[in-house]
Structure formats: C-alpha cells, structure tokens
Image (cartoon, rainbow, N blue to C red):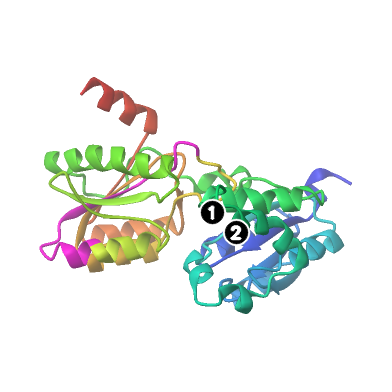
C-alpha cells in the first residue's frame, strides 16, 4: 500500500482548525479518521468529512488509541484547542472518568511533587502514549503548509512607529512566556504589558486587556515558543480572534511568520481592513537580529 493511501488519524479539539485540516486532507485524496474530543469537536462538520468518526472523552486516551488501531492509522495529527481550564474544575477527574491508559500516562505527573503539568509536558505524554501503540504524530502543517502565515503586512494598514516599538517590546515578553511554557500572547501599550496569556487562552487575554485599557489602541503579539513543537499547540489565528481583537479595542496584531496558522485568510484580512486593525507577521530571526542590534 502506498503511504498516501494510508488513513491519517486526527484528534480534533475545539474550533475551526480541525475542520480546515480534515477538508484539506480530503482534498488531497487522503482518507481521514477523526477522533473528536467530547465537548470540543464540531461533530456536525467533521463527521461527513471523515472515513471514520468517533468521539471520546478528554481522559479516554485508550479509546482513541483503539479507534485508530482498528482503522489502520499509523500517522496522525492534532488540531484544535483543548480547554485546559476544565482540568481544574472541582472533581474534574471524577467527571472525566480516565481510562487505564490515561491513568497510567498521567498519574506520575499528579503524584509527583517534582513533575510539572505544563502544556508541552502533558502533550508530549499524550504523543508518547500513542507512539507506544505504533501511532506517530506529525505536524498538520507538514500536510498543509499553505496554512502558515508568510512575512509581511496582511491587509492595508501597517503599524505606526510607536506601535512598532510596542511590537518589539511585546515580542521579547511573549518569547519569554513561551520559553517558560506559560502562554504565547501578550497585550502591550506604550511599552507596558497590559495582559499575558496563560491557561485561559488568547481570547480571554485579549478581553482582559480591553477591560484594563478602556481607551483601546493596544497591540497584541502572538508568537511560537522558542522550543515550539509543530505537532501541537501551534499559534493559530482565525476570524474569531480578529473579532475579539476589534471588540476589545486592539489596534495591532503581530504574529510570527512561518510558525503561525492562519484560517480563512480572505475573511480575516477583509474583517481586519474593515475595522482598521493592523495585522503583521515578522520573521523571528529578523526580530531577534534587530533587537540584538538595538
């Protein structure tokens, strides 16, 4: 069997990204087997695109692995957001009902005082659990490289000189947040940090910046982690993010080219133009060189 004839598995979280990935894979003639996360995935949109579709609970890794193995999946991708705050709900483990595979995978992180529960740590544990069963995760952007943003100004408006200073400042802050695996986004105005992203996600960070800066006009910088694993948790921008920025009063969105996913490009750029939002993408090496020179 040719490699391209093998089914590609996908763990689908929340948002439009899984739908875009499934549609892109299908347009390439690939067979897609989707394991949607209960309470996250868009079943109505994904099920018709998939050769096989099932939903599994967030703590049912064993069920997802068995589904992929029955479908003959050996290569898989992750797409979509997981609302990690649900892990900290009261009695979360009782409600999530972990199966044995999940318990075995994550118990060391909850029982140990020295192991952390950062995003990369937990997601690498998931990847490792699937790898033990012969299922290897790959970056979705390896299959769909056109989703990655290129360097330049996306739209009509470019940042002012003062806003460019905020981008430079925010870039350093966001990269440090990413290095610590805390978050990927920072809201800045006048080279002062208004809000930083943690477990709550980008949109909540943006809304908090808008609440704290009622005059608006602030800049949001969203970057990849310095140690970014392109298999998961890749920065993603879609129409929802742009709408949140506009509603909160932001003036600029700056992202990292080549490591940020852009969904529904034409709609996003049109909306940014209509509302006067500057949307720019910078190359990380260029930014680092400029900041070193400064």
Residue 77 x %, y %? 65, 53
Q: Which residue, given by chain and number where applicable, does mark 2 sit on?
A: 110
- Quadrant, the C terminus: top left
Nearest the eye: 252 or 229: 229
| Residue 143 placement, left or right of 235 | right
Which residue is the extreme one toward the left? 215
Q: Is residue 88 above or below residue 219?
A: below
Q: Nearer the viewer, residue 52 or 203?
A: 203
Q: Work out whether residue 24 can be spotted.
A: no
Q: Is residue 83 left or right of residue 130?
A: left
The label number, if any, that marks residue 217 in the structure image: none
Residue drawn at x 42%, y 39% is: 179
Q: Is residue 223 magenta?
A: yes
Q: Nearer the viewer, mark 2 or mark 1?
A: 2
Q: Nearer the viewer, residue 170 or 253?
A: 170
| 229 in magenta | no
Q: Are marks 2 and 1 in contact (CB under 8 Å)?
A: yes
Residue annotated with mark 1: 117
Q: Residues within 10 Å of mark 2 (few under 14, many from 20)?
A: few
Label 2 residue SS: helix
State whether residue 9 appears in this view: yes
Who is closer to the viewer here, 276 or 167? Answer: 167
Q: Residues within 10 Å of mark 1 (few under 14, many from 20)?
A: few
Q: Position of residue 292 (x, y in %)?
A: 27, 23
Q: Secondary structure at mark 1?
A: loop
Q: Looking at the image, tell me whether mark 2 or mark 1 is earlier in sequence order.
A: 2
Residue at the image point whose x is 34% and y is 65% from the top: 204
Q: Position of residue 168 (x, y in %)?
A: 24, 37
- Taking the spot 26% from the left edge, 65% from the top edge, the residue there is 208
Q: In the shown orientation, is residue 27 left or right of residue 92?
A: right
Magenta part of the protein: which range? 209-227
Which percent across, then down, holds residue 118?
51, 51
């Amino acid at each position: 069997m040719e490699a391209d004839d093998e089914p590609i598995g996908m763990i689908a979280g929340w948002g439009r990204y899984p739908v875009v990935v499934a549609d892109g894979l299908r347009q390439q003639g690939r067979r897609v087997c989707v394991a949607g996360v209960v309470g996250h995935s868009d079943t109505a949109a994904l099920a018709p695109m998939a050769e096989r579709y099932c939903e599994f609970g967030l703590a049912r890794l064993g069920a997802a692995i068995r589904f992929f193995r029955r479908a003959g999946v050996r290569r898989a991708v992750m797409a979509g957001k997981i609302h990690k705050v649900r892990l900290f709900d009261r009695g979360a483990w009782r409600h999530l009902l972990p199966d044995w595979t999940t318990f075995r995978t994550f118990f060391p992180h909850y029982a140990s005082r020295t192991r952390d529960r950062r995003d990369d740590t937990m997601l690498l544990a998931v990847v490792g659990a699937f790898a033990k069963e012969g299922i290897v995760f790959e970056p979705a952007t390896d299959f769909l490289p056109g989703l990655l943003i290129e360097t330049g100004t996306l739209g009509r408006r470019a940042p002012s000189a003062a806003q460019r200073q905020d981008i430079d400042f925010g870039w350093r802050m966001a990269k440090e947040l990413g290095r610590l695996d805390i978050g990927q986004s920072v809201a800045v105005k006048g080279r002062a940090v208004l809000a930083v992203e943690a477990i709550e996600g980008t949109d909540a960070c943006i809304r908090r910046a808008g609440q704290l800066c009622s005059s608006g006009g602030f800049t949001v910088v969203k970057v990849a982690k310095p140690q970014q694993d392109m298999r998961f948790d890749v920065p993603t921008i879609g129409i929802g993010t742009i709408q949140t920025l506009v509603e909160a009063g932001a003036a600029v969105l700056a992202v990292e080219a080549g490591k940020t996913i852009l969904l529904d490009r034409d709609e996003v750029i049109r909306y940014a133009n209509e509302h006067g939002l500057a949307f720019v993408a910078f190359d990380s090496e260029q930014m680092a060189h400029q900041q070193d020179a400064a």
